[in-house]
Amino acid sequence: GEYVDMLASGIIDPAKVTRSALQNAASIAALFLTTEAVIADKPAESAPAMPGGMEDF
């Protein structure tokens, strides 16, 4: 790895990657906000605990 002049090496716009990532993130956020439905994991319902005071039986 060596340091080079990006324009001379053909790297015209290194900020384009950042701009593209931000545009994609904004697009996904807008889609998420306008969908009105979200897919998420439902928490598992556990069985009720055994009541106390029954140890003698």
Image (cartoon, rainbow, N blue to C red):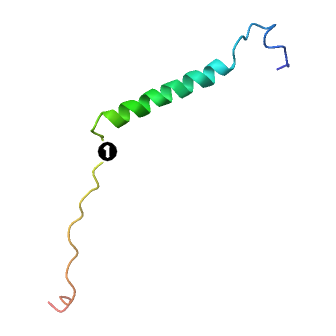
Q: Position of residue 11 (x, y in %)?
A: 73, 11
Q: Position of residue 7 (x, y in %)?
A: 79, 10
Quarter-wise, where is residue 30 in the image?
Answer: top left
Q: Which residue is mark 1?
A: 40
Q: Position of residue 49 (x, y in %)?
A: 23, 75
Q: Is residue 17 above or below residue 51?
A: above
32 horizontally vs 52: left or right: right
Query: Which element type, helix, strand or loop, lies under badge 1?
Result: loop
Nearer-the-camera pick, 42 or 50:
42
Instruction: Residue at 69%, 18% (x, y): give it.
Output: 14
Q: Amino acid at mark 1?
A: Ala
Q: Is residue 4 above or below residue 24?
A: above
Nearer-the-camera pick, 4 or 24:
24
Instruction: Residue at 30%, 40% (x, y): give it.
Output: 38
Nearer-the-camera pick, 47 or 54:
47
What residue occupies the far left of the structure in this picture? 57
Quarter-wise, where is residue 12 in the image?
Answer: top right
Q: Position of residue 16 (x, y in %)?
A: 63, 18
Q: Quadrant of the C terminus?
A: bottom left
Nearer-the-camera pick, 38 or 45:
38
Instruction: Residue at 20%, 71% (x, y): give it.
Output: 48
42 horizontally vs 15: left or right: left
13 horizontally vs 32: left or right: right
